[in-house]
Image (cartoon, helix red, strand yellow):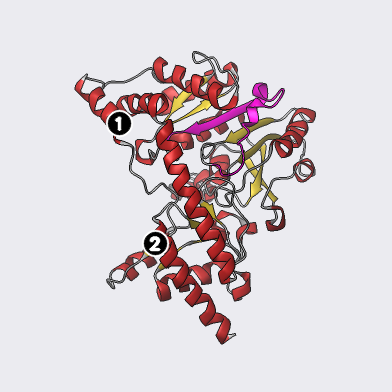
């Protein structure tokens, strides 16, 4: 056996695994664990999920499904009733029609929908243009599908919006997909219809596919969300990703969907049947109830998030941590550059000294350095106390300087 073969066989994992980055949270979770053992009150603005529990009428729908024996495999694409409900919801919210039989597939969270979409459309070496900062899983999902992430830097002075001319400047013969998520994690940025229309022109000019991650589409403030596939000519080249986790406080139910051209959805479903087979039956019945009767719950939660958003953004700016006004999701993304600390230094010291958890911005890409992500999906009283502690922390270091 050759030395080269011996070396290769010694390595038990594939090269793809080497391209997958750690989520980056492990260090801070370990630190959080050690601090929590001290018995001191910790306020977390770290985890990006609703602090609300799933509305009870949605839970009851799942319980009722169990009583009726919904404990078996479902159609791979999901229950027809749920696909029809999703189609009706998309038409109601965005004015766009999808055929529930051929253009919608139900997945295990929108994250699985994204994984399936990339594995469906990418060949080895295909490039995917995406904004930076980005949702932490974007590059790894692309790498696992043998694609190449091509980050486009966005700027805080433009509210971290993805610009069409910056996309076009990075297009090569290998470019196949434009990926973005709006409202955005981690910045809370929402894109206007006019901004997205400029990106649509680039996609059409260069015959590119678009994967539009719109999991936060129902969590917007003072602006109306524009579904990318609702733009003229974009439905035919867009895979729309959405789900139930954020709007309906159903993160643990793990249910999402992809909507797009029938040819692509058929290919996604083909891979889906060999990897997951089908989503959870009772979770799907709960999702039908969410779409049928959950609108008031969404409005109630969005109203709460909006109140918290105003408090945290105003407070951060008053402290001296410059923060643009997020128009969607439930994240604020303030700059910590005035403290002279890096994102990780600020995050670690804030946790150790004031027992407040935030996420370092560099976890979300190079353009996130100098910023931290604060999730305001937590009680208003906790946000107000966190701001008091952060003010004390920032003032302490400002005095030392």
| Furthest residue in direction left, as rendered | 67
Q: Position of residue 37 (x, y in %)?
A: 28, 69
Q: Residue at x 44, y 28 (%)?
A: 107
Magenta range: 220-244
Residue 28 % position (x, y): 42, 63
Label 1 neighbour load within 10 Å: few <14, some 14-19, many 20+: some
Position of 345 relative to 369 (above/below): below
**Which residue is more in the foreground, 149 or 213?**
213
Return the x and y of residue 98 as percentages of the image width and height. Answer: 56, 18
Judge the density around disc 2: few (<14), some (14-19), many (≥20) Cα neighbours within 10 Å: some
Q: Residue furthest bottom?
A: 400
Question: How far is the residue under mark 1 from the one under mark 2?
Answer: 28 Å
Q: Residue at x 45, y 71 (%)?
A: 388
Image position of 180 (left or right of 378): right
Instruction: State which quadrant residue 43 falls in.
Output: bottom left
- The answer to whether residue 340 is left or right of residue 388 is right
Residue 192 in sight here = yes
Disc number at residue 85?
Answer: none
Q: Left or right? Give the position of 63 relative to 128.
A: left
Q: Is residue 227 a member of the stretch shown in magenta?
A: yes
Q: Which residue, given by chain and number where applicable, does mark 1 sit on?
A: 57
Task: Report which residue position mark 2 lands on.
Answer: 382
- Give the position of the C terminus as an image quadrant: bottom right
């Amino acid at each position: 056996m050759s030395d080269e073969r011996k070396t290769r066989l010694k390595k038990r994992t594939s090269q793809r695994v080497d391209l997958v980055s750690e989520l980056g949270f492990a260090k801070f979770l370990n630190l959080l664990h050690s601090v929590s053992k001290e018995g001191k009150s910790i306020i977390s603005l770290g985890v990006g999920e609703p602090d609300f529990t799933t509305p009870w009428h949605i839970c009851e729908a799942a319980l009722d499904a169990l009583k009726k024996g919904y404990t078996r495999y479902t159609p791979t694409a999901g229950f027809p009733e749920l696909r029809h409900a999703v189609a009706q919801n998309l038409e109601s919210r965005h004015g766009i029609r999808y055929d529930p039989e051929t253009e919608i597939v139900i997945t295990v969270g929108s994250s699985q929908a994204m994984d399936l979409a990339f594995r469906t459309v990418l060949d080895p070496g295909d490039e995917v243009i995406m904004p930076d900062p980005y949702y932490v899983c974007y590059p790894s999902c692309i790498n696992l599908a043998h694609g190449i992430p091509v980050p486009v830097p966005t700027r805080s002075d433009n509210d971290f919006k993805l610009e069409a001319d910056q996309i076009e400047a990075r297009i090569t013969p290998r470019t196949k997909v434009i990926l973005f998520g709006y409202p955005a994690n981690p910045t809370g940025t929402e894109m206007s219809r006019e901004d997205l229309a400029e990106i649509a022109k680039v996609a059409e000019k260069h015959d590119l596919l678009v994967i539009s991650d719109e999991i936060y589409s129902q969590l917007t403030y003072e602006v109306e969300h524009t579904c990318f596939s609702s733009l003229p000519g974009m439905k035919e080249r867009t895979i729309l990703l959405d789900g139930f986790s954020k709007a309906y406080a159903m993160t643990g139910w793990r249910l999402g969907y992809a909507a797009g051209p029938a040819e692509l959805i058929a290919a996604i479903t083909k891979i889906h049947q060999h990897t997951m087979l089908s989503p959870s039956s009772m979770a799907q019945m709960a999702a039908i109830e969410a779409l049928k009767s959950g609108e008031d719950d969404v409005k109630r939660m969005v109203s709460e998030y909006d109140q918290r958003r105003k408090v945290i953004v105003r407070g951060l700016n008053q402290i001296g941590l410059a923060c643009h006004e997020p128009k969607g999701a439930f994240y604020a993304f303030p700059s910590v550059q005035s403290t002279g600390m890096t994102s990780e230094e600020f995050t670690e010291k804030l946790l150790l000294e004031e027992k407040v958890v935030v996420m370092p911005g560099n976890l979300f890409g190079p353009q996130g350095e100098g910023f931290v992500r604060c999730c305001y999906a937590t009680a208003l009283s906790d946000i107000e106390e966190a701001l008091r502690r952060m003010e004390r922390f920032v003032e302490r270091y400002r005095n030392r300087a």
